Image: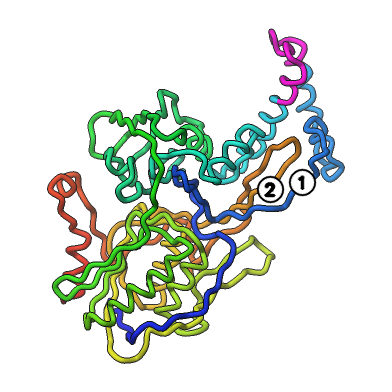
Amino acid sequence: MDTETHIAPVQPVPRKRSSFLGYGLAFFFAAAAFFSGMQVGASADASANLSTLFTSQQKQDVDMSLFWKVWQTIDARFVNATTSDAEADESRVWGAIKGLVDSYEDPYTVFLTPKDTEIFESDIAGEFGGVGMEVGMQNGMITVIAPLADSPAEKAGMLSGDVLVKINGTSTERMSVDEAVLQIRGPKGTEVKLTVFREGESELLEIGIVRDTINIPTLKVEDKDGIFTIALYNFSANSDDLMAEALAEFARSKSTKLIIDLRGNPGGYLQSAVDIASYFLPTGKIVVRENFGEGKEEEVYRSVGYDLGKNRPFKTVILVDNGSASASEILAGALKEHGVATLVGTHTFGKGSVQELIDMPGGSSLKVTIARWLTPNGKSISDGGLIPDIEVEITKEDREAKRDPQKEAAIKFLKD
């Protein structure tokens, strides 16, 4: 598919900011950890006692007799079940809540105990080191979405699509994404040992990574042989400003062929994705829909039409892979469906949901999925991600020979 638009010098645009929403796949294991697809708020009554949660008057139609029968039977018969009554009761309530949450079979809806909540908040505040990669749940397995450029994870050889079988010798079977995050992050200078399944390898890989403070890259440009490439590594608070500068450089280059490389980009701020899409789409065009479920009104995010101009046509290719997630999928999906860009690479990750972090009694918290992202045409991003127009795999042999057949295919398409 030929995809053309027009370009003129990029002008400064008004700054518009919203909550940190676009990326929500777990976390960077970084000292400056941040998360999206996530909203924080909605406090619960902190004075409530955990042991009274199952007597809620809001669910009088639910028969809890079986639950209490099992509780009482274990209490009476299980050896050492009541060594520490207060702690045992509290722990069992937490376990029951986790079971309730797990019954929704959503890897991003998670109950956090007070201890987990404290560690989670410390990680977000940047008080711990990390390895510089992000993980999510794919096919029921803890999977690497993308290692950051120049991070300890990338230097150790981690790849998008790697499945974490064990973390420090502990099996990840039945482990949630958040539990994996808590296992992997830790003090700078310490090592985490990962047992990894990688497609194409006959044996499991044992990879040790020393945690460090992570510097998150944002953008890099290259102007070579008439092809202008912008590699965007995440959708940070200033990524759209940097994109504006890169597009201005593209305009000055006189090139008419643009590659936007979103491979290994796990997302970031939703508003950055909307702003960047606005450089390519006319005013009012839909960038993404936020769907809150049946019977609830959608929220629609539209291009503000920054309009790169009408001076000359140019063709755009977006490179994507299994490490392209959330905000990356929002941008790529919008430009693809509006006929502005051709996608080259492999299927994207398929992270299209929004989580809210809710304070719960006793210092615990609940991270719950509250909405899903839909492309302009209404496709759920979580339903298998995006399928490229031109599918190109990178093999083990390509990696060893430092070949990039995906970029080669993009260049061939642009030149043809």
- Check the image and name the residue furthest to the bottom: 311
Amino acid type of the residue tagged 1 in the rendering: Ala
The image shows residue 409 at horizontal and vertical percentages of: 19, 65
Q: Is residue 58 left or right of residue 240?
A: right
User: What's the magenta bit mostly, secondary-structure-wise?
Assistant: helix
Q: Is residue 210 above or below residue 13?
A: above
Q: Which residues are magenta?
A: 73-90
Q: How many marks?
A: 2
Q: Nearer the viewer, residue 158 or 73?
A: 158
Q: Does the magenta run of residues contain 143? A: no
Q: Residues within 10 Å of mark 1 (few under 14, many from 20)?
A: some
Amino acid type of the residue tagged 2 in the rendering: Ile
Q: Are marks 2 and 1 in contact (CB under 8 Å)?
A: yes
Placement of the C terminus among the 4 image quadrants: bottom left
The residue to which callout 2 is attached is 358
- Check the image and name the residue furthest to the top: 79
Q: Is residue 132 left or right of residue 77?
A: left
Label 1 sits on a secondary structure element that is loop
The quadrant holding residue 411 is bottom left
Q: Nearer the viewer, residue 339 or 186?
A: 186
